[in-house]
Image: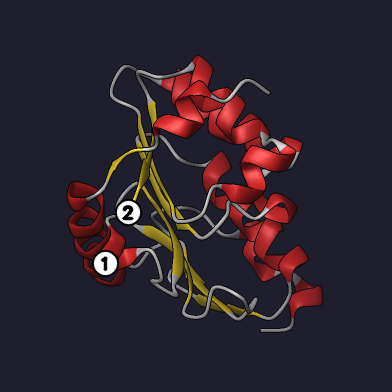
Amino acid sequence: MNESAAGFLRAILGETRETFHLQSADAARDLTVRMVEQATRTLDLISRDLEPHIFDQQPFIEALKRLALKSRIARIRILLQDNNLIRQQGHRLVDLAQRLTSTIEIRRPDEEYREFDENFLLVDGSGYLHRQLADRYEVTACFNNRLQTTQLEALFTEIWERGEPDREMLRLHL
């Protein structure tokens, strides 16, 4: 896909089956916001350090906040592998999680998964954004691929269940 065409800006969560291949942080940020804006129930995220260029931007924070407040069944689970940068610089997503503790939970993966080199975002059991190498913005994403999303969700759940709440993020005062 030609990123300048930004075909994903017309994508509909749960409907658009096209797979998008992106190569830049800006495109990944825009696609992430587009997907989260359409979320109605769940969001699962595994990230090395909650990349500020994507997850500490106002459009993303607003979309996440709308999801968290949308209904009583909304659930946002975040696996944060390394919280050093956030402890030093702060992060709006962590601030939001501290205010919405019944909906947003941040966990630290078990030691076995701390060096896991993939990042992904899963939305409502149908949409996903996947980076196989966390330090590169080579992104594959689809707004409606339940099979791939289910496979990634099984991996996420395995890591989630073995992880523990990130107490440092709960106590952090930004």
Considering depth in this image, is 100 or 86 the residue closer to the camera? 86
x%, y% of residue 68? 45, 25
| Residue type, mark 2 in image | Pro
Check disc 1 and report its element: helix, strand or loop: helix
Q: Please state, as top left, top right, bottom left or bottom right, where the N terminus lies in the image.
A: bottom right
Identified at 25% across, 48% down, the residue is: 163
Q: Is residue 4 visible?
A: yes
x%, y% of residue 157? 21, 54
Identified at 77% across, 64% down, the residue is: 26
Check disc 2 and report its element: helix, strand or loop: loop
Left or right side of 86 for 38: left
| Residue type, mark 1 in image | Glu
Locate residue 135: give its quadrant: bottom right
Q: For mark 2, what is the residue?
A: 109
Considering depth in this image, is 156 or 172 the residue closer to the camera? 172
x%, y% of residue 149? 30, 64
Q: Indicate which disc residue 112 carries.
A: 1
Could you tell me if the residues under marks 2 and 1 are in contact, i.e. CB atoms within 8 Å? yes
x%, y% of residue 169? 50, 32
Structural distance between the alpha carbons of marks 2 and 1: 8 Å
Q: Is residue 16 visible?
A: no
